[in-house]
Image (tube, rainbow, N blue to C red):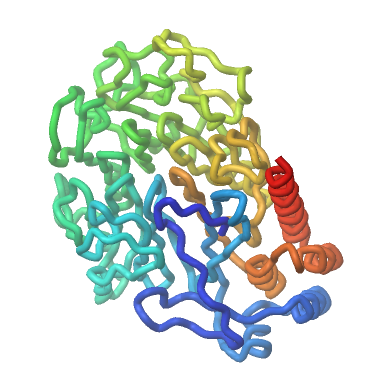
């Protein structure tokens, strides 16, 4: 984790212990902190390369703590300033199944036992602990201890989770929706049916800045919150907080009457919404002043009041959709990535000047794209959009990022804007989930080997004194990402020293 912390949305570093330990309290019941040195790291890496022994077996013999199954790590990154570059990685014992998306000032994660953890800003009760006090460490959401949480979504100041009762025998799915935070009626998680019947199964939920959309197993959407830009998809705008209604009108063509469409995925941006239909079509609605709806010409000025099909993607089957602050990205079944909307911070990945145009004038000089444009032709598996940056995981196991990068949330480079897709270090293991917020990013990975565990742990202790030695060990053991990290750290700290010397001489 590269720490940037104007808001406490990152878990702070825990003290290392000389023996493996698992915290049993509610603050973080799943952190494992085995002790490593450079010497035993190299020894264990070499042992791994020779024996190819699986991680659980080695953990039993080397660390004295039995465990089973795959490991999954939740990692955050952002570069705050020139003095706090050191990567810090959280070891999450157990399987983290989801990370809250569209996170700006708070973060949430689901553990393998169905527990929900949250941390960060809490000024509207979005952490679900009944207070408005922010937390720097992951804390279990205690009111959901009787529920097995399956997924979670973070909005600007609210949180929503899908869970089922723990006493459920598993024969019948009873996934229910829980909401809390700003405009949700409680600082504690509360069961919310909205416009759905109590026996309806909830498949997904997504939170925007001031609106929330939930998807049922039957493919129906219900939306609630504010609707000043038409983000609730009701065909009109209105002031004030709006209750939940089911969306039942989707416009495939402008000259045809809207009809009901079965939806399989939904994503909320800041003030716009996007959804994927069963046949792979994309529908968008809400605020479109920066082209984030992808419709080229807009109805009603800068807003789309009903879900409208993105005709520029006709014939292209989309499998994943993500909305940022004022941009949208879609991944096709062939692994191509399309993006549209605002590009003033590089979040479209098309460069600082080229590739941008608007079909209609929006009265500004800002860079935007009103229709989808192909950014990555193949190999994309997952996409996540932060407020002004984008992340994708590739089939080759790498993560690429671009967009606003002032805190290091989008790319390794030091520039404020990352205009083109570029690889992101530090990532080990198979990518499972991505999340992007306002100034930080998170990735969930599987770790299948002791080598990957060693790489994660040693990256937590690298500094200017030992960076050269760790880089040498990493190079000889094939840990390329760790070697690159050490090289970048040394360059960064040396540049920092040169700058300080120049300031003293001046």
Residue 437 is left or right of residue 131, and the answer is right
Residue 249 is left or right of residue 382, and the answer is left
Residue 332 occupies quadrant: top right
What residue is drawn where x is 33% and y is 65%? 149
What residue is drawn where x is 53% and y is 32%? 347
Relative image position of residue 189 (x, y in whole percent): 21, 61
Residue 393 is left or right of residue 441, and the answer is right
Relative image position of residue 349 (x, y in whole percent): 59, 30
Q: Quadrant of the N terminus?
A: bottom right
Task: Relative to 350, say whether 489 is above or below.
Answer: below
Relative image position of residue 342 (x, y in whole percent): 47, 25
Task: Please tell me which residue lies in front, 63 or 332.
Answer: 63
Residue 448 is left or right of residue 298, and the answer is right
Residue 300 occupies quadrant: top left
Q: Is residue 300 visible to the viewer in this orientation of the structure?
A: yes
What residue is drawn where x is 60% and y is 41%? 401
Q: Quadrant of the C terminus?
A: top right
Task: Please tell me which residue lies in front, 266 or 370.
Answer: 370
Q: Is residue 168 visible to the viewer in this orientation of the structure?
A: no
Relative image position of residue 115 (x, y in whole percent): 35, 70
Task: Relative to 384, say whether 119 is above or below.
Answer: below
Task: Relative to 485, say whether 224 is above or below.
Answer: above
Q: How many marks?
A: 0
Task: Relative to 41, say whether 470 is above or below.
Answer: above
Task: Please tell me which residue lies in front, 347 or 235.
Answer: 347
Task: Please tell me which residue lies in front, 296 or 252.
Answer: 296
What residue is drawn where x is 82% and y is 68%? 469
Residue 249 occupies quadrant: top left
């Amino acid at each position: 984790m590269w720490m940037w912390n104007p808001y406490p949305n990152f878990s702070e570093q825990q003290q290392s212990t000389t023996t493996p330990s698992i915290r049993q309290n509610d603050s973080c019941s799943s952190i494992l902190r085995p002790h490593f040195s450079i010497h035993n790291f190299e020894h264990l890496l070499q042992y791994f390369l020779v024996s190819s022994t699986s991680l659980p077996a080695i953990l039993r013999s080397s660390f004295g703590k039995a465990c089973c199954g795959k490991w999954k790590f939740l990692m955050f990154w952002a570069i705050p300033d020139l003095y706090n570059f050191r990567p810090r990685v959280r070891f999450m014992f157990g399987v983290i199944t989801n990370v809250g998306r569209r996170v700006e000032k708070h973060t949430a994660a689901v553990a393998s036992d169905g527990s929900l953890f949250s941390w960060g800003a809490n000024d509207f009760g979005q952490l679900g602990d009944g207070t408005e006090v922010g937390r720097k460490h992951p804390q279990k959401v205690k009111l959901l201890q009787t529920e097995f949480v399956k997924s979670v979504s973070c909005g600007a100041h609210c949180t929503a989770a899908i869970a089922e009762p723990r006493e459920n025998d598993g024969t019948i799915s009873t996934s229910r929706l829980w909401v809390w935070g700003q405009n949700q009626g409680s600082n504690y998680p509360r069961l919310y049916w909205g416009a759905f019947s109590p026996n309806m199964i909830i498949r997904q939920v997504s939170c925007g800045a001031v609106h929330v959309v939930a998807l049922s197993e039957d493919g129906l959407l219900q939306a609630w919150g504010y609707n000043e830009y038409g983000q609730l998809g009701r065909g009109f705008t209105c002031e004030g907080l709006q209750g939940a209604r089911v969306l039942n009108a989707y416009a495939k063509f402008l000259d045809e009457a809207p009809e009901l469409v079965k939806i399989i995925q939904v994503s909320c941006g800041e003030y716009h919404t996007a959804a994927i239909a069963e046949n792979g079509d994309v529908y968008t609605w809400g605020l479109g002043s920066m082209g984030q709806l992808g419709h080229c010409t807009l109805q009603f000025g800068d807003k789309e009041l009903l879900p409208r099909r993105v005709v520029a993607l006709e014939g292209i089957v989309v499998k994943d959709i993500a909305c940022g602050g004022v941009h949208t990205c879609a991944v096709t079944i062939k692994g191509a990535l399309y993006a549209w909307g605002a590009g003033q911070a590089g979040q479209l990945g098309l460069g600082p000047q080229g590739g941008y145009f608007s079909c209609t004038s929006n009265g500004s000089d800002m860079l935007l794209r009103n229709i989808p444009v192909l950014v990555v032709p193949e190999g994309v598996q997952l996409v996540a959009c932060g407020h002004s940056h984008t992340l994708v995981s590739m089939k080759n196991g790498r993560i690429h990022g671009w967009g606003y990068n002032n805190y290091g949330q989008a790319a390794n480079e030091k520039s404020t804007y990352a205009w083109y897709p570029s690889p992101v270090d530090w990532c080990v293991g198979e990518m499972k989930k991505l999340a992007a917020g306002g100034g930080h990013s998170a990735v969930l990975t599987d770790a299948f080997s002791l080598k990957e565990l060693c790489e994660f742990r040693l990256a937590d202790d690298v500094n200017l004194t030992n960076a050269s030695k760790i880089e040498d060990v990493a190079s000889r053991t094939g840990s390329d990402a760790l070697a690159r990290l050490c090289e970048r750290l040394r360059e960064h700290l040396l540049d920092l020293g040169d700058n300080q010397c120049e300031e003293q001489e001046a």
